[in-house]
Amino acid sequence: MQIEEFQKQFGIIGKSKEIRDLIDITMQVAQSDISILITGESGVGKEIFARAVHFYSKRTDKELVSVNCGAIPESLLESELFGHKKGSFTGAVDDRKGYFEIADGGTLFLDEIAEMAVTTQVKLLRVLETKEFMRIGSESVTKVDVRIIAATNKDLQKEVDSKKFRNDLYFRLKAVTLNIPPLRKRRGDILELANTFLNNYSQNNKIPLPKLTSDAYELLINYDWPGNIRELKNVIESAVALSKTGLIDTESLIPLLSLELREDEFRNLPVHVNRPPEVLDREMIYRALIEIKKDLIDLKQLALRNEPEISSYDSTQNNKNEIIPLDEVEKQAIINALKQTHYNRRRTAKLLNISERTLYRKIKDYDLE
């Protein structure tokens, strides 16, 4: 199997050494049954590599079951993984298989493994060591043959040091570690990715192929992409959707970038420092972009001041004594935070000072998906 065939099969884009080395290692370990830990920031494509490992393994004709450990409430995760017997707890109206039984003979992908509660980690470790477990409320042992692939955007060693993750489970999972580099570490792939997203959007929406100006290309290459490939895709698609001419320039892109995340970092940075020229150039570009975005925001606010004021709460905003239900305030705060972070849930949770698990639950409760 050639690297190019692998990339075409799974839509992995890029010719950088970093991505080609990663694909090479992935193909080497896929045939074994060894546990794999995939690390990398949000948006780098960890699930794509998990699917690739399963596809090229001996288990490809069996099930690949993906579980987002951060999206399932702690009280339900154990039942979801191991199943339960009827009557074992309130709401258990029938016997139910867990993901381990569903994935028997195949692969279980545990995404956001760092979000798993320590009590559940203990039971997961037992399954890895003995290949057996008991459903909640059951007295009999169930045996399974499952390959585990785990993924996280956190530093698990730091989680171990802070007693949030079990040391023995960490070493059991990291038999092989695939570290997916962030987009800023493989800038040579950015233009190919951007052009692919443009082509895909054009074909899917049956519109003429949009074009990027040379300045826009320069901006895409020099931006740090904290949301990685997911953010790049969202920015490209949003810019095309909002464009009236089909030509994407820097003015189209700047309002869509999260430049405010780096404003504090560059505010007091001296220009003449002992750094490589390419680093200095990049920092100067960030300075300029931040200032441009500030100007755009100021212009937008000025325009809004000259228009009739529109409020999401309508008449309630005009009466300071009006009581607004707390759930309405909370819902609006989540909506505002999601918009500000371009629907990056990790940054949204950080902005709201809540856990990602709580955010997932709130989004579901308020039907914001």
Image (cartoon, rainbow, N blue to C red):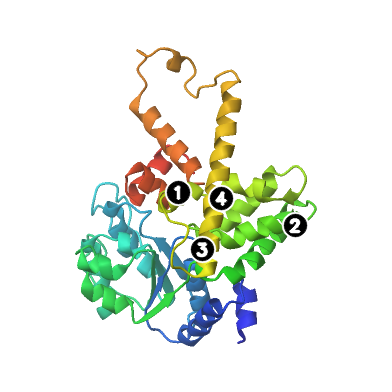
Q: Nearer the viewer, mark 3 or mark 1?
A: 3
Placement of the N terminus among the 4 image quadrants: bottom right
Q: Label 2 is placed on what type of residue? A: Gln
Mark linked to residue 263: 1
Q: Residue at x 25, y 63 (%)?
A: 120
Q: Does residue 96 show up?
A: yes
Residue marked by disc 4? 288
Identify whether 263 is placed above or below 113. Answer: above
Say which residue label 2 marks. Answer: 203
Q: Amino acid at mark 1?
A: Glu
Name the secondary structure under disc 1.
helix
| Position of residue 176 measured from the top left corner of the image (x, y, whole percent) | 38, 81
Cα–Cα gap, marks 3 and 1: 16 Å
C-alpha distance separating marks 4 and 2:
34 Å
In the image, taking residue 75 as reference, residue 33 lies left or right, namely right
Q: Relative to the observer, which residue lies in front, 222 or 17? A: 222
Left or right for 227, reference 355: right
Tag in front: 4 or 2: 4
Coordinates of residue 130 in the picture (x, y in percent): 25, 79
- Going by the numbered disc 3, the residue's amino acid type is Leu
Category of crowding for the residue at label 2, using alpha-carbon neighbours closer than 10 angstroms: few (below 14), some (14–19), many (at least 20): few
Q: Is residue 165 above or below residue 291?
A: below
- Per the image, the residue denoted by label 3 is 280
